[in-house]
Image (cartoon, grey):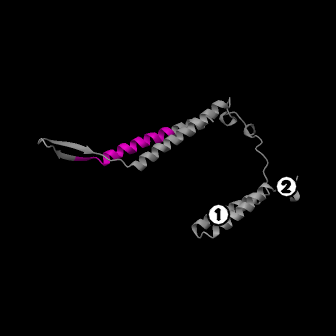
Amino acid sequence: MRTNVGLWWLLTAFFFVMAVIYTVWNLIVHWDAAVANNPDGTWWVYFTGSVEWVGSVALLFTAFMGGLIAFYVGKVHKAQGGELPEDVLTADIDDGDPELGEFSPWSWWPIVLAFSASLAIIGLAIGAWLMPVGIAVFVVAIVGWVYEYYRGHFAR
């Protein structure tokens, strides 16, 4: 976890530096000199620079998002009260293997759910008539997956 915090802060710094470099580079490339004649008869040179704002803002917001993730992961690391087994070099694989829940390796409902999602997306791309079919298959897949332990051979 400590390594993740460090990596996210490193990414934040990288994207912030890249945002600054990108903005300065745009100013240098688009630096145009213009000569103006004042009403009092004096001449002076002024420079106009422009920035490509989409790239600058995107890089800056990427740095902010990385900072948010780094801050959150750092707070979680501090709140857990110790090192995770993944952070200890002498830890075994079994040390970080908690019980995650009950999963059905024989269940076909996740495949039906993925099919319904692909059917709905294809419906967006090809024709709107296919999307309700995908949504109907989605509802059937969700109900089947949720209630698979309440009926049939594996009922409790």
Question: Which residue occupies 63% across, 70% down?
Answer: 129
Q: Of all residues shown, which one is farthest toward the top?
A: 81
Q: Quadrant of residue 142?
A: bottom right
In the rendered image, the vertical position of residue 26 relative to residue 2, given as above or below: below
Measured Cα–Cα span from mark 1 to mark 2:
27 Å
Q: Position of residue 77 (x, y in %)?
A: 64, 33
Magenta range:
12-33
Examine the residues drawn in magenta and state their main secondary structure. helix
Viewer-proximal residue, 107 or 155? 155
- Is 2 a magenta residue? no
The residue mark sitting in front, 1 or 2, is 2
Q: Amino acid at mark 1?
A: Ser
Question: Which residue occupies 76% across, 44% down?
Answer: 100
In the rendered image, the vertical position of residue 129 relative to residue 59, given as above or below: below
Q: Quadrant of residue 101?
A: top right
Question: Which residue occupies 75% across, 59% down?
Answer: 109
Mark 1 or mark 2: name the one nearer the start of the chain.
1
The circle on residue 118 is 1
Which residue has dot 2 on it? 150
